[in-house]
Image (cartoon, coloured by chain):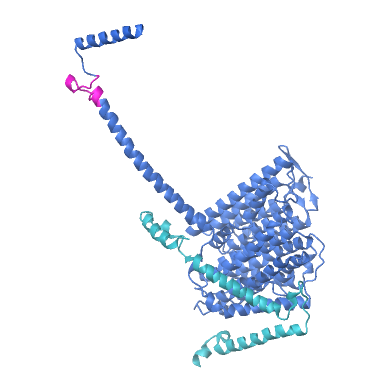
Chain colours: A blue, B cyan
Amino acid sequence: MEFELFSPAFILLIASVLICLVKGHARTAVILVAPIITLWAIWQIPDGVQGTIKFLSYNIEPVEGSPIRRLFATVFAIMVFVGGLYSFRIAKWYELAAAFAYAAGAIGVCFAGDLITMFLYWELMAIFSTIVVWCGGTPGARAAGIRYAIMHLLGGVVLKVGIEGVVVGTGSIQIQPMLATDFSTWMILIGILINAAAPPVSAWLADAYPEASPTGSVFLSAFTTKTAVLALILLFPGESVLIGIGLFMVMYGIIFALLENDVRRILAYSVVNQVGFMVVAVGIGTEMALNGATAHAFAHIIYKALLFMSAGVVIYRTGKNKCMELGGLFRTMPLTCICGIIGALAISSFPLTSGFTTKSMISQAAVDMNLVWVYMALTAASAGVFLHAGIKFPWFVFFQKDSGLRPKDAPWNMGLAMVIFASLCILLGVFPELLYGLLPYPVDYVPYTIGKVLFYLQLLLFSGLAFFVLLPLMKRTMTISLDTDWLWRRALVSVLKVFDRGLISIGGVLGMQRDRLQNLLHRMVVRYLGQPHTADSKERGVFARSWPVGTTALWIAGLLSAYVLLYYL
Amino acid sequence: MNDEKELHWLVRPSTIRKLWIGSGVVLTLMVLAQTVIYVKGYFGFDAWFGFGAIYGFVSCLVMVLVAKLLGLILKRPQNYYDEPQQDGSSDSNQDKVKESSNGV
């Protein structure tokens, strides 16, 4: 009975503690075995709430199973395993411990049966993902980590405000579909959207992820945004405002990725782009759309991690992360290159890859609801994804020009991790039924019809043509692009500085006036009371002198006559 | 000719020329295939001949141009955010220079 309340997240939390305690092969064993036990535990959870705990006056449901929750948890656990395999030889132990605790948070959210449990795991993710960012170890990583933490703790507060509001308003802490109709539900939606890197705060993602270590960014790319997608699916299916937000994210990701020079930042922007597809799907809200969002999240975690792994190997081997400094690496890094290309094809939803079988479900959902503009925008975005991630990433890293770099290919464990994920990308592309069978709703969808394949091939190949025709326009420059984070990194700082200067000058003026007042008072005191310690009566102040008796008598006479006069009036 | 031999076979000018020709043929075939294969359009216009090709090309063109234009406004040197932290004393002077050149 007690065991049923044991969330699979605890396994990873225990593993995280063990990673800190043990060393050498034992640590490696923990890193590789714990995710597999977690995966097993995930599949032991039946549907429905597994029991409640009374806390204050609330019924906490630590574990609730459903197909969609299990599916998200499954891909998270796979991610931890392959990510652990990828990192265990080069990552610092505290980075791995933090990454495991971070993943525990994500899996905890998957099975959270109520809003309070969800919030606790949500914050666990925020804390440990910040530590993963900090493990980048550079001053840039430290600063980015602080900005990341502020953003996520702020998001947590907004979410908490919303949860409190809903609990007070409805008396229920259940996780159930709602629409953003009042203040509290809007707060919950905004809190979740901050984690999904929705506008206007998308910038946190491209700011923080590329600052982490090559291994850290692999973990970071998987959990936070996809947990937010799951939360959106569970709480806000069919909330139409999400369609607009999602489309904005899709386009934002493409445009900013096109401008970018930093390899991992290109990939970070394309995370926003891909999550945008899922957010649109949640906004459409039909069974097909939610299936699409779930399947796409599953596939996305795999190919995005693969891309980050491939970029990570390049950065690990060359120490360089700018498109301008890289190029021509296919000569000595064939495995990394091929795996990177497979990831790039998958993200561009090329036929026979997992992107095609999952993302096209979202387009199909838009068609079913007769949303012409949404469909056209998603189609254009698919072309754009091929442009910014599908070709741009492999081209600038592995081909382009000969940078003269001749690094070694990936170490065996990193190579193996990439091969596993690359195979999964193709497996899910060739046998989509494997994934379709696990989706929350029955799937009535045929991904491969010859007409559709031809349409997508035309679309993608001509996007490829556009890339090479427009290559002169895409010359990389050693630049970054301003984003909304300019508002808090520069504008706010400038405003505060102006404010500071204003306060300083006001302080100066006030100080001068205070000095003047002090002097005036001092002069008055000296005048009336005299300098201190002066015995000579002439030096004394007006009040301190000894006056002659006659003068006093005159004063008293004057006062008495005034008194008599007043008495008779 | 000697240079050509030293290069990796994939980056020799002759290979690149062949690649361009090859992809040109593939692209043409992709469009021509639509004469044989029926592309089911959902909204009418998306079944037009070569629609996918044109739509893909044009939307990429638009996105690249939009990015290029936005880049004129948004691009900054990559140490844009770093400088103020380096030197606390000459901070205010540097800031003035930057604010005048970067006001958005």
Residue A15, image x and y in percent?
Answer: 65, 54
Given residues A229 and B94, the one toward you in this image is: B94
The answer to whether any part of residue A142 appears in the image is no
Q: Is residue B97 magenta?
A: no
**Residues drawn in magenta:** A526-543
Question: What's the residue at 70%, 66% (across, down)?
Answer: A374
Given residues A490 and B12, the one toward you in this image is: A490
Q: Is residue A529 magenta?
A: yes
Main SS of residues in magenta: loop
Q: Quadrant of residue A455?
A: bottom right
Given residues A559 and A168, the one toward you in this image is: A559
Give the left or right position of residue A67, taking residue A495 as reference: right
User: Residue reaching furthest front?
Assistant: A569
User: Residue reaching furthest bottom?
Assistant: B1
Residue A271, image x and y in percent?
Answer: 62, 64
The answer to whether any part of residue A341 appears in the image is yes
Question: What's the residue at 65%, 53% (across, down)?
Answer: A192
Question: What's the residue at 36%, 8% (across, down)?
Answer: A569
Residue A423, image x and y in percent?
Answer: 70, 71
Quadrant (top left/top right/bottom left/bottom right) for the N terminus of chain A: top right
Q: How many marks?
A: 0
Residue B23, image x and y in percent?
Answer: 64, 85
